[in-house]
Image (spheres, rainbow, N blue to C red):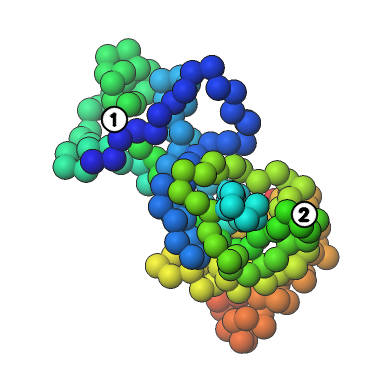
Amino acid sequence: MRLPLPQFSGVTRHPNHFAEVIETATSEFLAQCLEPETLSFPAMPPFGSWVRSLDEESGNLIYAVVYHATTSPIDSVHRARALGMSLAELREEQPQIFAMLKTEFRAAIVGYKTSEKPQSFYQHIPPRPPQIHQAVYFCESEEIIVFSEEFDFLRMLLQVPQAPVDALCAAAIREIYQLRKGDRTWLVKAGRYLSTLLRDDYDRLRVILSQIHL
């Protein structure tokens, strides 16, 4: 049975620090969201959102895209059951419920940057993934915009096993497009890159691009 992550009072976290790595692998990691300070469920990261963590020994910052998230009981033996109560009623009558659930997500690694060249992003699998128990942060807008000057991350997203890869690419592009405030020139470049990856599968390309909007 997994225990909830320890919450240490008096420790001020960075506002973008919202999770901790609990399993790690070459091309992805599993993280558990930290418990909120109020009686509520941990905030589930949006599908296709951009996150980063750290390989502390090398100093590499690891960038990834969320492709799967779940909220489930900490006790893997007993499933949650319907209670027919609103969140307000749960807080009033069943406050222990919030301590009995965990939110986890999987993120596909799409690149990294090194401490030696902090201005350069590499869009391929890093030498090592983030270490277990490392903090996970939501990426800053500026980081995502600079990272997305190149498009090799799209190839990596299209190869994520057991993920809805077309929807994942669309979600990742959509967030960037919104952060870039509707930069049509960038979107056209992304579409052209996708068209080469999909090798004239125009129906698939059309479905991905149809999901991108402001």
Q: Residue at x 35, y 37 (%)?
A: 102
Of tags 2 and 1, the one toward the viewer is 2
For this rendering, which residue is in front, 152 or 80? 152
Residue 95: in sight, yes or no? yes
| Image coords of residue 67 (percent x, y) | 48, 57
Q: Tell me, for residue 116, which label it has, or none.
A: none
Residue located beneath label 2 in the image: 118
For this rendering, which residue is in front, 66 or 213? 66
Q: Residue at x 70, y 69 (%)?
A: 151
Name the secondary structure under disc 2: loop
Q: Residues within 10 Å of mark 2 (few under 14, many from 20)?
A: few
Q: Tell me, for residue 100, which label it has, or none.
A: 1
Q: Choose top left, top right, bottom left or bottom right for residue 75.
A: top left
| Image coords of residue 100 (percent x, y) | 28, 30
- Residue extending farthest bottom: 199
- Residue extending farthest top: 92
Q: Residue at x 48, y 60 (%)?
A: 28
- Residue extending farthest left: 77
For this rendering, which residue is in front, 73 or 25? 25
- How many numbered markers are drawn? 2
Q: Quadrant of the N terminus?
A: top left
Name the secondary structure under disc 1: helix
Q: Choose top left, top right, bottom left or bottom right for residue 152.
A: bottom right
Q: Residue at x 59, y 49 (%)?
A: 56
For this rendering, which residue is in front, 24 or 95? 24
Residue 154: in sight, yes or no? no
Q: Is residue 127 above or below residue 73?
A: below
Q: Is residue 19 above or below residue 110?
A: above
Amino acid type at image mark 1: Met
Assess whether mark 1 and mark 2 are in contact (beta carbons under 8 angstroms).
no
| Image coords of residue 92 (percent x, y) | 32, 13
In the image, taking residue 82 as reference, residue 5 lies left or right, namely right
